[in-house]
Amino acid sequence: MKPMMRPWLGLGVLFIVAALTSCRPAMDTQHPDEPAVDEQDVTDVLSFRWHYQRFLERLVASDGRVIDRSTERRISTSEGQAYGMWFALLSDDRGTFEKLLQWADANLARGRLGDQLPAWLWGRSDDGDWRILDENPAVDADIWMTYALFAGAERWQEPRYAALAHRLSRRILETSTRQQNGQRILLPAPFGFTRDNYVLMNPSYLTLTVFEGLAAYSEDARWLELERSSRRLFLALLNTGNGVVPDWLGVSSPVEIVPFEQLEARDQDVVAYGSYDAIRTYLWLWWDAQRQSDERLFHGLSRIYHLTDERGFPPERLSFHDEVASGIGPIGFSGLLLPVLSSYDAAFGTRSAEEQRNRIQARNPERYQDLYYDQMLLLFGLSALGCVEFLSDARLDLTAEGMRDCAL
């Protein structure tokens, strides 16, 4: 297991940018030929509902705090609360949705959620107190929380959720976006990611479908501006020709990728590869391809699909510059890629998705059930296969048959 840690970002303090990507501590890797520790019913380990129940049992405290038990500080993040709310929404689990929201409000926003965005990091401090460890918000978490609140307002007919979602939407657009030569771009956080000649951006925060849905829910056209600039950035990535999405990118005006040699030294390492952050982007692009007639991004940024097919497992890391692949991706990578690989198989006549299903089935869940990020990636992939459908305007389709199948 390879830890992926990032330094904490203190306001006004210089930091090494690996910030605001959520800690990526213990992940469950296993050699593909290693025998399974235990035999599991495929119906269980390939079921969103089954994994959601394990998530509630292992990672959610009674007060609604999502706990990353793989870290010494037992941290909680705005990402964990937001992702948990999304999965609770898909499960029609309003009680958990409400508890996770209330915990985030009380502990990450000091009871002022909506007036402010939630702090991204909470846990045990060096002096033993439990408190906010970094005040900076993480915009991807804020976006997912806002979308979940809008959809939850529709699902449960709760105006309070819609009112809060509108406030968060405006707050994100005011504090975490920037006009750059006529293009509105998304900052990873309000503080710390602007350089003299470029902005550091995280492609996995650019969920095109969610941006379109937020435009429909909020009736705020600024979300469509973000969708357009983000699509332009992905097309620029496509034009590099290497088929790889990196964890981070330097982006200059208006929306141009900064060459590696022109980046500040502190940024060069994090833009050199795609790994624990970038893996999510492939699902977001798959969602986009399901809704759009233009599949260039899905098929063009596809090196990871070919490598997974060749090797039988996803690589842990892909170099952005020389296309070298290294490491064995954790079980969460296999789970998240299931819907993506199903489309790849349909296009190329391969069996990659089946191989990854077999990999998940062969793994004893006890190895990863306490590993926060593995669980999140599995839940995203399995829900995309069975629960999530979007309307033409990218709002969540609450009438889809899969939504009933995924409800508790």
Image (tube, helix red, strand yellow):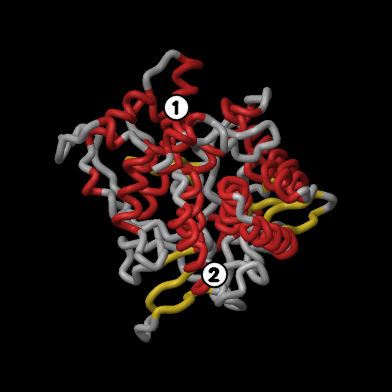
Q: Give the x, y percent position of residue 83.
A: 48, 52
Q: Is residue 220 visible?
A: yes
**Residue identifier under label 2:** 105
Q: Decide: is 64 above or below 221.
A: below
The residue that appears at 34% across and 58% down in the rendered structure is 59
Disc 2 or disc 1, which is closer to the eye? 2
Given residues 287 and 145, the one toward you in this image is: 145
The residue that appears at 48% across and 22% down in the rendered structure is 344
Secondary-structure class at tag 2: helix
Q: Give the x, y percent position of residue 314.
A: 38, 35
Question: In which image quadrant can residue 358 be found?
Answer: top left
Q: Taking 36 as reference, is 166 left or right? A: right
Given residues 113 and 373, the one toward you in this image is: 113
Q: Give the x, y percent position of residue 150.
A: 63, 51
Q: Residue furthest front?
A: 157
The residue that appears at 34% across and 36% down in the rendered structure is 47
Q: Decide: is 150 above or below 33.
A: below
Question: In which image quadrant can residue 163 be found?
Answer: bottom right
Q: Earlier in the sequence, mark 2 or mark 1?
A: 2
Question: In which image quadrant can residue 178 be found?
Answer: bottom right
Q: Residue furthest bottom?
A: 127
Amino acid on which the number 2 mark rests in the picture: Asp
